[in-house]
Image (tube, rainbow, N blue to C red):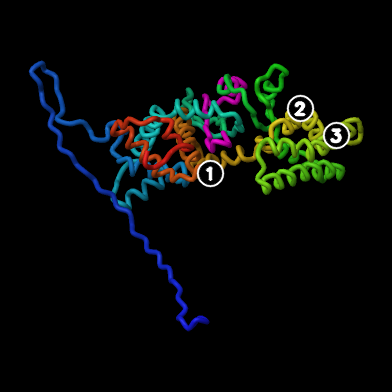
Amino acid sequence: MNRNGMPDVWEYRVIEHVRAHNVEHVYKVARVKLADGTFVSTMEHPLKKLGGIFSPELLARLLCLKYDFSMPENRQIRLLAREGIHISNTTLNSYIHNGIAKLKEFMEDVFKGFVQQAEYLMVDETTELVGIETKEGKAYRRKYLWAFFAKHMKMVYYHYNNGSRSSDVAKSFLEHFMGTLSTDGYTVYRMFDGEDSKVLHIGCWTHCRRLWVDALPSDRTAMEIIDSIGDMFMNEDLFRTMKLSGEQIKGKRRQLTGPILESIHHKVVMMMQDAKIMANELMRKAVNYTLNQWKSLRNILKDGAAEISNNLCEQRMKPVKLLLKNCMNIGSEDAAENSAFIFSLIESCKLNGIDPQDYLKHLFECILHGKDCDKKTLLPCFYKPEC
């Protein structure tokens, strides 16, 4: 009893699982010969536009099992068999990639173009094993996948360009970009550091810090730089707690972070002039990286809306790596391109708090029924289920 003489009331929760089931529809179709000798069917395959026999709901589910929950296709085969669907691995793979190809045809140009128009992009690249045909047969090569993350729009576009990591890939994708670009220290991005560049290139202080941490066991003076970088990140936490705007953060950085940067630069220059320190390979690497990247590292003072670390973009690669861990490779070159785009859709949905399976189902229904809809409203950052 409570103090008012009323009985205490509480709830027990019991969760029951209702097993999924699938329904197979069989259509009988007649093939008719016309007077001119040609043949015509009495109806087309109802799912012809999706390139397979799976409904929008089931196809969306299978795509999410693989690209959201990292389930390899051989495990999906076993799961489907338990649910009464018996299909070969080759057929499943074909239907999955046919579905992705339809999504690419329907949405990729709009999606890619929208990300390219962002005012702030974070960029990273990672490796994946891709199957290629050689004279000796199929072989797997290490290829590169890029991620262009529009942080403020909560959109990420994964870009596979023949597995290349060359400057041409970034140059082509960012050809008309005139905003702020956050990257790691990969030398390709130095092309944005020129005086005539229309891009504000911002370096990654997390990458810089890692080198000093690596050098710490061999030289304790590295701790001075690590502590200073830590102070910068403490400032960033403070700015987030205060919920400051980009312009306000810019002012605070100049006031609080500017002196820290000058102190770091002075200390690193002094280290470069110390023969004993530069004889230490790890310290030399940290010193050279910091000074070579100094212009881009210091650019954090010029844009308060930009991050001082590229970690948020690096984190976008985790789903790719998890799938690779379970599947061992990404598949063929075509599969690599398809995987890049389906990852773009699913990860952007997750960033925007949207259920990827419901979203993909909606896109497939638009394709299947030819719905007339503004494709921009179908981008994850604008998408509303009732659209």
Horizontal arrangement in the rendering, residue 348 relative to residue 245 (left or right)? left
Asked if the residue at tag 2 contacts the one at tag 3, i.e. Cβ–Cβ closer than 8 Å, the answer is no
Please name the residue that numbered disc 2 is placed on: 295
- Residue at image position (24%, 35%) is 46
Q: Does dot 1 land on a helix, a strand or a loop? A: helix
Q: Nearer the viewer, mark 1 or mark 3?
A: 3
Choose the circle earlier in sequence order: 1 or 2: 2
- Residue 357: which numbered mark, if any? none
User: What is the quadrant of the C terminus in the image?
Assistant: top left
| Mark 2, secondary structure of its residue | helix
Is residue 367 at all visible to an observer of this figure? yes
Q: Quadrant of residue 99?
A: top left
Label 1: how many Cα within 10 Å (few below 14, some 14–19, many 20+): some
Mark number, residue 268: 3
Instruction: In this rendered view, identify the residue nearer to me: 87 or 167.
Output: 167
| Of residues 322 and 42, the one drawn nearer to the viewer in this rendering | 42
Disc 3 residue type (three-letter):
Val
Q: What stretch is highlighted in magenta?
A: 150-172
Q: How far apart are marks 1 and 2 (CA)?
A: 35 Å
